[in-house]
Image: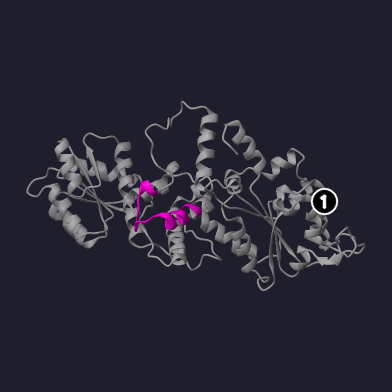
Amino acid sequence: MSYKTGKDKLLVVDDQTSTLEVLQRNLTLQGYQVFTAPGVNEAIEVLNSTNIDLVITDMKMPKISGMDLVRHIRENFKDTEVMVITGYASVNGAVEALKTGAEEYLAKPFTDKELFSAVNRSLRKLNLHRSEKSAPAPDRDTPYGLIGTSPNMQDIYRTIRKAANTAATVLITGESGTGKELVARAIHYSSKRSKAPFVPINCGGIPEPLLESELFGYVKGAFTGATESRAGFFQTADGGTIFLDEISETSLAMQIKLLRVLQDKEVCMVGATQQRKVDVRIEAATNKDLLKLVKKQLFREDLYFRLNVLAVAVPPLRDREDDILLLAHYFTEKYSKELDIKPPSFTEKALNALMNYSWPGNVRELENTIQRLTVMTDSTIIDVPDLPSIMRFSANNGRGFNRTLVEVETEHIRGVLASVKGNKTKAAEILGIDRKTLRERLKTIQMDS
C-alpha cells in the first residue's frame, strides 16, 4: 500500500546542489510536496516553520553532520520520520543511524525504485505511529455502525444517502463478512421508513419447505400443525423494509413467488385464496455473482433485474486498507469496554502484520481476531507472537510459487478454521462456501471433520 497522498511533506537535506535537484524533481513527480536544504541549519529553519512528515538527509555534510540532524529531529519533533542516505555506506554507519533514530538507511547510488520504496516504508511507519498514539473513533457522520474513512467507504456513504431518498429495491453485493446487512440497515434507518420495522431474513438459514410460510405467513389449517393463523415476515415488515440476505440460496419456485411480490406488492398466505397488499421496501443481498447464476439457469433473470434497481457493491477489507487500523482500534475499545479492562495497545510490528494480512473473512474476521486477542492476551501490549499463526512469518512453511493449489487451499482452510476456533459454520461463511462443501474439502485434504 502506498501512503503517497499528495499532502505528505518531505524535506531533502544535502550539501550537493545536483543531488537536491534530482531528488526534488523525482519525488515531486511522485506527488509529494518537497522542500530542500543545503545544510543542517537551513533544515532546522524549515522544520521550525513547516510540519514536515519525512526528512531525507545526507550523512556527511560540512560543519554539522546528518547524524546530528537525526538526533535533533528525534529530540525535538515527535511526529517526523527520518531517512538517511549516504555515499559512504558502512555497517557501522547504518547501525549508528538506525540506533540514533533513522527509520531507513539508503546507500548511494540507489535507483528511483529503491528511493520510492524507502520513502513509502517511512511514511507507512509514520502512519502507524499516528494511529497508535490516538486510537481513532468512528466518524460521527458514518451511518449506523459502518466504520471507515477510505475512498471506497465514502462512495458507499454517498450511495446510502441516495438510496435512502427513494423507495426503490436495492441489491447489495459483496464477499462474506463485508457488512452487507449494516449497509441495508443504514439505508432503512436513513429513509422515511426508519420508524417502521427493519426485518432481516437469512434465506439460506431457513429450510426450503418452511421458507414460504415464514415469508408470507399461513392460515389456520393450511397444513398439519397450523392450529392458528400466523403472519409472515412480509406482513411484519409492512410500512418498513424486509432484508432478504443470501437471496441466491432461494429455489426457482420461491423466486417466482418473490417476483410476484415485487411486481404486485401483494402476498398470499399459505392456505389462503386472497392476496394481501403490503407496503414493503425490499433489500436483498448476496455474496455470489447472480449474473453467473442466471447464465447457469440457477437464478431467474427477471427477478435479478427486478432486484437490481439500485446496486450497492460493498468492498472487501483488502480494498480498504486505510480502514484496517481504524476498525482494529474500534473493536479493541469495544471488547475492552465489555470486559471492563484497559484497552491493550499494539506494537508497530503487530500493526504491520494486521495491515499486510489479506483478511479473506473481511471485517467479520478482523472483529473475531480482535475480540480473541482482547480476551486472551495477558499483557497490555499485543505483539506479533500474539497474533494468529497465519499472520506470522514462518521460515519452514514453504511459501512461494512452488506449491500446488491443493497445498495453498489446505493452508488457507486450516488458517480460517484456526481463526474461528474450529467453528465450521463460521469457517464456511468466511470461505464463501456452504458447510457441505467445507466437509467435502476437509475429507479431501484428510482433515478430521
The magenta-colored residue range is: 368-386
What residue lies at 14% left-to-right and 47% top-to-bottom?
Answer: 66
Residue extending farthest to the right is 273
Count of marks overlaid on the render:
1
Q: Is residue 66 left or right of residue 205?
A: left
Residue found 60% across the figure and 62% down from its top: 160
Q: Residue at x 18, y 41 (%)?
A: 95
Q: As drawn, is 245 to the left or to the right of 363?
A: right
Q: Reply yes or no: does residue 385 show up in magenta.
A: yes
The structure's colour scheme is: one colour
Instruction: Measuring from the top left, give residue 204's x and y in whole percent.
Output: 70, 50
Q: Is residue 135 left or right of residue 65?
A: right
Quick one: 376 or 331, which is closer to the camera? 376
Q: Nearer the viewer, residue 79 or 355?
A: 355
Quarter location, residue 380: bottom left
Q: Is residue 4 visible?
A: no
Tell me the quarter of the image containing the N terminus: top left
> Would you call the spot at circle 1 few (<14 residues within 10 Å), some (14-19), or many (20 or more)?
some
Q: Residue at x 52, y 56 (%)?
A: 153
Instruction: Answer with the quarter of the image where residue 183 lies.
Output: bottom right
> In this rendering, would 225 be left or right of 175?
right
Q: Which amino acid, by three-letter code, is at mark 1?
A: Ile
Check residue 295 for magenta coloring: no
Position of residue 190 measured from the top left corner of the image (x, y, whole percent)? 61, 68
According to the picture, the residue beneath numbered tag 1 turns out to be 256
Q: Position of residue 340 (x, y in %)?
A: 42, 67
Q: Residue furthest bottom?
A: 195
The quadrant where residue 393 appears: top left
Q: Which element is circle 1 on?
A: helix
- Where does the C terminus fall, quadrant-wise? top right
